[in-house]
């Protein structure tokens, strides 16, 4: 009789495939990733900061936390989108200044494929 | 072996699959069809008596996935409210697993293309992470903090906004 296979080593959550971790981060939302999940370890930080597709839709409605500078959090999210932010939503803390900050970082894609990143005046 | 469930779909044929560690499993064709990978193999006539080999899915998670697919295939269409509720309860109990199994289900469901199970495992993982500090998450998932003190300092500077009003939520900063 063949001997039973040796027990498998426990899985390494730090090495979760990028697509699976991205799906988890998408479910967590921008606030959840920015508030802690994204700084658990190097590999999670890499996914949280270097995958602009995670930041295409940033919805911070219902995320208000009085202990956090929400405007700064929103700016951090807009920066991570690297010009590809397509949808931004926020309540109560969204000031004109914040919306202006986000609009300035918008990358306009023209029909000829040329990209223009709007710059600060 | 086990008979196909009465209402498991249009075919009563049993599909065999083989885990990476050599264990054989059977499920109704309708259940196997919930996996994109298995469905394509069945369509391509790759499902034979020897079973479809799943090189990266071990027996433990595969047994769970076979359970999940069999349950969901048997109750796939024309659900009454009670049946939908029962399926929801099944899902909730099904995903109450330790983090080792959760990891295996996340990866295996993605590999096999079982959409409902992928969503369930992703939601469960997000629920475990939500509202926790980085240090608590490291404990939950057995992750080692591999940042150097310099990197930690840099992260803290970049995330000052999160920590400036109350004390830092983690051992970072």
Image (cartoon, coloured by chain):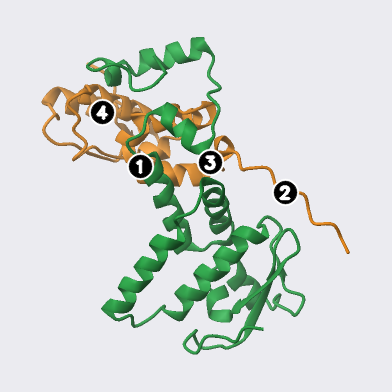
Chain colours: A orange, B green
| x and y percentages locating residue A27 in the rendered image | 36, 46
Q: Nearer the viewer, mark 2 or mark 1?
A: 2
* Label 1 SS: helix
Asked if the residues shown at circle 4 and circle 1 are in contact, with their CB atoms under 8 angstroms apart, the answer is no
Residue found 35% across the figure and 39% down from its top: B130
* Label 2 SS: loop
Mark positioned earlier in the residue sequence (2 or 3): 2
Within 10 Å of the Cα at label 4, are there few (<14), some (14-19), or many (20+) other Cα atoms?
Answer: many
| x and y percentages locating residue B90 in the rendered image | 41, 67
Left or right for B91, reference A102: right
Q: Nearer the viewer, mark 1 or mark 3?
A: 1
Within 10 Å of the Cα at label 3, are there few (<14), some (14-19), or many (20+) other Cα atoms?
Answer: some
Mark positioned earlier in the residue sequence (1 or 3): 3
| x and y percentages locating residue A109 in the rendered image | 35, 38
Residue nearest the viewer, comparing B17 with B135: B135
Q: Nearer the viewer, mark 4 or mark 1?
A: 1
Q: Chain of mark 2?
A: A
Residue found 29% across the figure and 26% down from its top: A105
Q: Which mark is residue A74?
A: 4
* Label 3 SS: helix
- In three-dimensional space, the C-alpha distance between marks 4 and 2, rounded to whole angstroms, equals 45 Å
Reply above or below: B34 against A47: below
Q: Which mark is residue A18?
A: 3
- In three-dimensional space, the C-alpha distance between marks 2 and 3, rounded to whole angstroms, equals 25 Å
Q: Which residue is mark 1?
A: A28
Q: Which mark is residue A7?
A: 2
Residues flagged by tags 4 and 2 on a common chain: yes
Left or right for A22, reference A73: right
Residue nearest the viewer, comparing A50 with B47: B47
Mark positioned earlier in the residue sequence (4 or 1): 1
């Amino acid at each position: 009789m063949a001997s039973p296979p040796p027990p498998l080593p426990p899985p390494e959550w730090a090495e979760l495939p990028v697509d699976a971790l991205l799906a988890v981060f998408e479910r967590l939302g921008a606030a959840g990733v920015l508030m802690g999940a994204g700084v658990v370890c190097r590999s999670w930080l890499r996914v949280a900061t270097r995958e602009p597709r995670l930041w295409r839709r940033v919805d911070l409605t219902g995320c208000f936390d009085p202990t956090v500078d929400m405007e700064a959090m929103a700016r951090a999210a807009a920066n991570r989108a690297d010009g590809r932010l397509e949808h931004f939503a926020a309540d109560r803390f969204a000031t004109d200044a914040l919306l202006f900050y986000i609009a300035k970082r918008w990358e306009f894609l023209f029909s000829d494929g040329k990209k223009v990143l709007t710059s600060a005046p | 072996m086990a008979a196909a469930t009465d209402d498991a779909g249009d075919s009563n044929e049993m599909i065999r699959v083989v885990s990476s560690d050599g264990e054989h499993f059977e499920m109704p064709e309708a259940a196997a069809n919930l996996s994109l990978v298995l469905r394509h193999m069945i369509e391509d006539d790759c499902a034979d008596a020897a079973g479809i080999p799943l090189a990266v899915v071990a027996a433990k998670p595969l047994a769970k996935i076979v359970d999940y697919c069999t349950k969901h295939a048997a109750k796939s269409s024309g659900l009454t409210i009670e049946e939908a509720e029962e399926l929801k309860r099944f899902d909730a109990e099904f995903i109450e697993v330790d983090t080792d199994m959760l990891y295996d289900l996340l990866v295996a469901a993605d590999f096999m293309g079982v959409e409902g199970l992928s969503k369930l495992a992703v939601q469960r993982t997000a629920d475990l992470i939500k509202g926790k500090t980085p240090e608590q998450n490291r404990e939950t998932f057995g992750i080692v903090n591999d940042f150097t003190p310099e990197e930690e300092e840099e992260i803290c500077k970049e995330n000052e906004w999160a920590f400036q009003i109350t004390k830092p939520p983690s051992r970072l900063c």
